Image (spheres, rainbow, N blue to C red):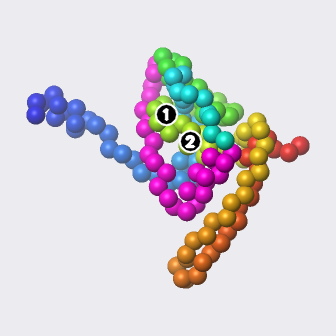
Amino acid sequence: MSIGAEREMKDAQKPDHISLSTLIGRLKEGRFVIPDFQREFEWQPWDIRDLMRSIFLDYYIGSLLLWKGKSENFGALACEPIYGFNGSNGNAEHIVLDGQQRLTAMYYAFAPKNRLRIAQTVTFTLSRFSTSRRWRTTTLSGTIGPAAG
């Protein structure tokens, strides 16, 4: 292996592991932006429901590919905030290369002030074997869409 290749490997970033609450906080702060070449948000309410169910059941939901961008990168790629984000774009930190559908779905589900334009009530039941060796069932219900009123 050449010295240049060794240096590139040495400078490669290691994957980060962050908690769901940290990820949601960063979403609400507007730290993720979408480059112009990404497709629009296309998930349906049932896709969001299925993702939320997977999260609450602690299933693997994939990884995200993010590029820690600079202001010139955001401009050159015509980046925009996560679809539905109403805040300032001044907090942009990461360009989403893979995972936009999941991040946007999480934003809609966990940022109640910012809802999809089409209302859809989503209800699902989570059953899980608890540490006390009993089945624990929780029913979650909520509206994914514009707030009433």
Q: Amino acid at mark 1?
A: Val
Q: Which residue is mark 2?
A: 103
> What range of the chain is rendered magenta?
45-73
Indicate the position of residue 120 as horizontal and vertical percent values.
76, 46
In the image, residue 64 lies at what x, y percent?
45, 42
Q: Do labels 1 and 2 touch, CB within 8 Å? A: yes
Q: Residue at x 55, y 63 (%)?
A: 57
Res. 109 visible in picture: no
In percent of width and height, residue 119 lies at 78, 43
> Is residue 86 positioned above or below 103 on the image?
above
Residue 47: image tag: none
Q: As displayed, is residue 67 above or below residue 136?
A: above
Position of 108 compared to 79: left or right?
A: right
Q: Amino acid at mark 2?
A: Leu
Q: CA distance from mark 1 to mark 2?
A: 9 Å
Q: Residues within 10 Å of mark 2 (few under 14, many from 20)?
A: many
Q: Residue at x 64, y 30 (%)?
A: 88
3 or 71: nearer the viewer: 3
Q: Which residue is mark 1?
A: 96
Q: Front-most of 81 and 48?
A: 48
Image coords of residue 145 (percent x, y): 76, 43
Q: Residues within 10 Å of mark 1 (few under 14, many from 20)?
A: many
Place residue 118 in its image quadrant.
Answer: top right
